[in-house]
Image: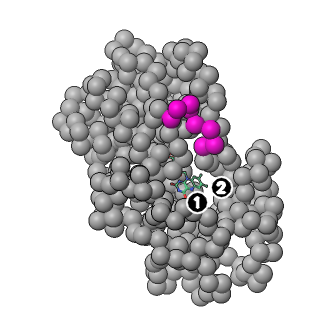
Amino acid sequence: MSRVLIVGAGLTGSLCACLLRREMRNKVQISVWDKARGPGGRMSTTRPPDASSHSADLGAQYITATPAYAQAHHSLYSELLSAGVLQPLDALLEGLKQKEDSKNYVTPLGMNSVVKHFLSESGADLFFERHVIGLYCRGASWEVERMAGGSETFDAVVLTMPVPQILELQGDLRRLLSVQQKQQLDQVVYSSRFAVALFFSPDVALSFPWAARYVSDNPCIRYIAVDARKRNIDIPGCGPSLVVHTSVPFGLQHLEQDKEDIQPIVLHELHRLIPGLPQPNSIKCHKWRYSQVLTSVPDCPGHMTVLDRPLLVCGGDAFSHSNFDGCVESALSMLRVLKACL
Ligand SMILES: Cc1cc2nc3c(=O)[nH]c(=O)nc-3n(C[C@H](O)[C@H](O)[C@H](O)COP(=O)(O)OP(=O)(O)OC[C@H]3O[C@@H](n4cnc5c(N)ncnc54)[C@H](O)[C@@H]3O)c2cc1C
């Protein structure tokens, strides 16, 4: 049995774990480590502290399939639809500019349910709050160092975090990258945004008709969604929640500021856009330093092999493109490498 560590319980890592289990059932022992407290990564779904309101998707909002990807990834779309994880979008979205032949899907249980689905299918040993800080090549295996102290060894390691976080790792990784690989990784650029979730009490009714609105004339806010309406669900006794994303220029301009300083600015602009909005019970603000990939690794190879033996491979949306299908492409391409190597 080969021991494989996948770092990152986002979509790329969880799908890679799932596909690896399906293809190499009894030949691999898979572990997934994530520094966060739960699964999802940038497909994160958060809850208010008192659980009285609906949850809110802080990162990715929809899954949009172009005809080409709907066909290429047909089996995964069918799997998620028949498991009830995905549903066709059926809600009023104001200002969405989209090609007519693409299809939008929502996740009734929140975006992180896609990741949870693949993790549960993977049968992997899952560890959260496990922050990898170093990788050391020890003969035929990798010694993986944790921030909390201690290390473990694996026969192969898959890294799926954003590229700047890959490059921060101590140990042998940077030494093993070729000059060309370093240049390619240095070219990757991400947008940055702040996301704010407002959780309201169950007696609050929001009077506007839309489920989500793309804002084009505000210096701070780009997108607002009523989470349950977007997902087309109604949970009796649960208050509504609103998700606000700032624009990319605003995110970039305020990137080094604390989210506590940004939250009042976003709320001020929100009240200008929706006058009379009731007071929420609780608010969560999140800074996405690495939001969507603006410039991917050249030619979108899906993965980058740092070392063949012991295998160290990097993947994620930076190696393809920044959406569901980009992560699928990356996971599939890492699967090919893993199968060839193990
Ligand atoms: C605001 C926003 C809106 C978006 N909207 C959409 C959308 O509508 N539709 C769409 O398809 N896509 C959207 N995206 C993009 C989509 O979310 C990403 O492409 C996708 O989630 C990337 O998945 P990933 O697994 O490659 O990376 P991630 O989700 O970033 O997963 C990487 C994981 O690695 C973990 N990690 C990082 N460093 C370490 C470490 N040192 N040790 C252990 N763990 C570590 C992180 O905690 C994280 O969970 C959006 C993204 C954002 C932020």
Image coords of residue 199 (percent x, y): 61, 73
**Residue with the mark numbered 2:** 286
Residue at 66% across, 84% down: 208
Image coords of residue 172 (percent x, y): 51, 16
The front one of 104 and 3 is 104
Q: Element type at marker 1?
A: loop
Residue at 79% across, 66% down: 217
Magenta part mainly helix, strand or loop? loop
Residue interval drawn in magenta? 293-300
Say the numbered circle drawn on residue 58. 1
The front one of 242 and 331 is 331
Quarter of the figure with the N terminus: top left
Quarter of the view holding residue 185: top right
Q: Is residue 161 magenta?
A: no
Q: Do labels 2 and 1 touch, CB within 8 Å?
A: yes
Q: Element type at marker 2?
A: strand
Q: Earlier in the sequence, mark 2 or mark 1?
A: 1
Q: Is mark 1 within 8 Å of ligand 1?
A: yes
Quarter of the figure with the C terminus: top left
Amino acid at pointer 1: Leu
Amino acid at pointer 2: His
Looking at the picture, does residue 327 appear above or below residue 101? Answer: above
- Using a 10 Å C-alpha cutoff, classify the residue at mark 2 as few (fewer than 14 neighbours), some (14 to 19) or many (20 or more): some
Q: Is residue 299 magenta?
A: yes
Q: Is residue 127 left or right of residue 95?
A: left
Image coords of residue 28 (percent x, y): 25, 33
